[in-house]
Image (tube, rainbow, N blue to C red):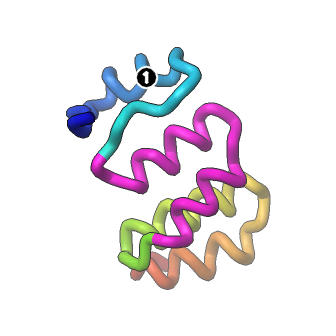
Amino acid sequence: MKPQHMDFDTFQKSLQNEAPPTLSNPLLLALWHDAKGNWDRAHDIAQEVDTPDGARVHAYLHRVEGDNWNANYWYRRAGRN
């Protein structure tokens, strides 16, 4: 299946589905799972992406979790203080 183009509106609409869309960007997939309430799956995906964007999503997920210390660590890894 061809990866789907994903703008914000398309992403929001995809949250009505039970299964995620086919996405070429794993970080969008992680955010999709988080938006659906599956933090663990989102975290598993994000921690596999070793880029500054991956670190930002990883940090966001820890912030959502309430683990600010860990979130701050990942924000620093992403180059944000």
> How many numbered discs sit on the rendered protein?
1
Q: Which residue is mark 1?
A: 14
> How busy is the neighbourhood of tag 1: few (under 14 within 10 Å), some, or many (20 plus)?
some
Find residue 18 and report its horizontal and vertical position in percent: 58, 22
Whether residue 20 sits left or right of residue 10 in the image: it is right
Direction front: furthest residue: 1
Magenta-colored span: 24-48
Whether residue 34 sits left or right of residue 40 in the image: it is left
Q: Residue at x 45, y 46 (%)?
A: 29
Q: Residue at x 50, y 71 (%)?
A: 48
Find residue 41 and report its horizontal and vertical position in percent: 64, 52
Residue closer to the observer: 23 or 28: 23
Q: Quadrant of residue 65?
A: bottom right
Give the vertical position of 36 relative to 48 (above or below).
above
Find residue 33 and report its horizontal and vertical position in percent: 58, 41
Residue type highlighted by circle 1: Ser
